Amino acid sequence: RVIDVHRQCVVKAPKSCRYIALSYLWGGASVFKAFRQNFPQLQVENSLSFECESLPRIIKDAMYLVAAIGERYVWIDSICIIQDDDEDKALQISAMGGIYSSALLTVVAGAGSDANAGLLGVHSLKRKQFQHIEIVQGMELVNRMPDLWKSMDDCPWASRGWTYQERKLSRRLLVFTENQAYFNCEHATYREDQHLEAEELQPDLLRWHQAERDHRLLFVKKSNFEVYAREVKQYTSRLISYDSDALNAFAGISQLLQTSFRGSLIFGIPDTAFDAGLLWYPRGRLTRRRDPENGSPIFPSWSWAGWAGPVTYDD
């Protein structure tokens, strides 16, 4: 399912659908959601126009942006997944890897801590930081603003578990931070504060746009287990609101790892390298993941998924 921004409703994705995905934080905001009761209405043309007052700013900004750049479809989790249908949620979560990796690009709300923060620079939302400009002996000088991932280091989006796989699996990212927008793909990063584009490819200019590749799920010059160990280390340093989501928020990455390992993951550990997979150890304080209703452990103690906190593997 995707949202058709022309018809302002939820539709079944057309064959070979070209769509944009949204990566954002729900946070403490009241997020408009699809439920079994209201879902038939959300499929009626202009239904989202009628719900405009109920939609958080991030969803309104994303729909506006998609239309403004000439696209028609956008995938947004709170509306494209029926939130009170366990079967539908399980199906969609299992497809999360394909949803983000198949999107034309993923729009990232890199500023703010909830769904009402919106996309800074889109619509009427003004940015919080600007380039500093000084005139020295008649020459106008401006400072170079932070690199993409440097500017994202301290933002809440970069600390949450669900956004980890959204970042790792997306082919292209259009990131809205407090100071500017960045476009990032496997080959390059472009930014608003630098005008170094050319009509023809120029290697001398391209080196200024070299992309940081660590945020991609790459198997280049690394064994399958090295890649797996890196992903687990980075993922477990992030926060998850509900302990039961520890494996769900890693599901998209698990799908790709299963293909490489030619086996399944048992509570997050590859069965074809199960002995090595058990050899994780803490990098900090760990607490047991438990069912909030009865206090019983959710996952086995021998799996890193059974514990909240950062873990690692020896090189």
Image (tube, rainbow, N blue to C red):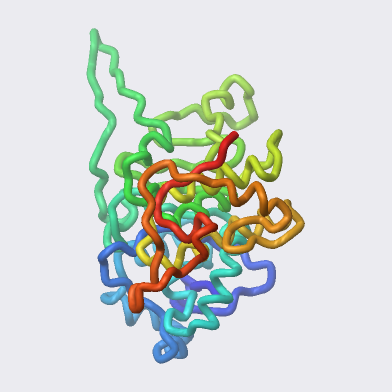
Q: Is residue 57 left or right of 254 when viewed as pictured?
A: left
Q: What residue is at 32 percent from the left and 50 percent from the top? A: 156
Residue lying farthest to the right in this orientation? 262
Residue 273 appears at what percent x and percent y?
70, 51
The picture quadrant where one finds residue 94 is bottom right
Q: Is residue 32 above or below residue 114?
A: below
Q: Is residue 312 above or below residue 63?
A: above
Residue 278 appears at what percent x and percent y?
59, 51
Q: Is residue 13 above or below residue 314?
A: below
The foreground one among 15 and 85 is 85
Residue 16 appears at what percent x and percent y?
68, 67
Q: Count the numbered circles shown.
A: 0
Q: Is residue 212 left or right of 49 when viewed as pictured?
A: right
Q: Is residue 1 left or right of 309 when viewed as pictured?
A: right
Residue 75 appears at what percent x and percent y?
50, 67
Q: What residue is at 43 percent from the left and 83 percent from the top? A: 84
Q: What residue is at 60 percent from the left and 61 percent from the top? A: 97
